[in-house]
Image: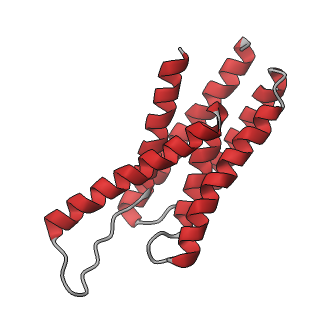
Amino acid sequence: MTTAGIVLVAAGFAAWGVGAVWVSVINLQTKILPKQIIWLTGGVVLVLFTVAAILEGEPSRILEFLLAGASCSAIFYIIYTIYPEGIGFGGVRLVTLNSLTVGWFGISAAWVSLALGVVLAFFLSVWLLIRHGVGKGSKIESPIGPILVAGAGVAALLVTMFLI
């Protein structure tokens, strides 16, 4: 990769990091995943990665990270459609952003990030059930944003470690 390409991709991941942390903090405080921040961050990542792919002479990479974002978010959209009380549409948006970003490394990396987020969410759910118990009519709510971001972050870190 050229220096310009590396800088653009690094800037894209930095933008994702700032947006993802910002969204996670808001999600922890309010249980809301703000769409404005998610879409703004996604737009910045999309532009930076698109320019990087063109500069690197790899326009097919654009299709790959777009497919990564679309394919992973499609699963969450189906879950949202079936059970909107379980995950809000903000979760679908965040999965789109995370998958688009990690999708720079390929569709499989995006799916790994989604799988890691789901596994982390499962373990958090088990821990919450053990801690709070399950009673008739009880409802335990946990913000999913930080968990999905952690999964994407770990996947990006693992891919980066194996590429270096």
Q: In percent of the image, x 57 and y 46: which residue is there?
A: 98
Above-or-below relation of 151 to 85: above
For residue 94, side relative to residue 142 (left or right)? right
Query: Where residue 62 sits: x, y (%)?
Result: 78, 37
67 or 39, nearer to the observer: 67
For residue 118, side relative to residue 44 (left or right)? left
Above-or-below relation of 153 to 134: above
Query: Picture quarter containing residue 2?
Result: top right
For residue 35, side relative to residue 146 (left or right)? right
Query: Picture quarter containing residue 26?
Result: bottom left
Query: Where residue 27 sits: x, y (%)?
Result: 42, 59
Query: Where residue 131 sits: x, y (%)?
Result: 15, 64
2 or 103, nearer to the observer: 103
Residue that extends furthest to the front in the rendered view of this protein: 108
Query: Where residue 44 sits: x, y (%)?
Result: 69, 41
Could you tell me if residue 72 is visible in this image? yes
Q: In percent of the image, x 58 and y 33: which residue is there?
A: 13
For residue 143, side relative to residue 100 (left or right)? left
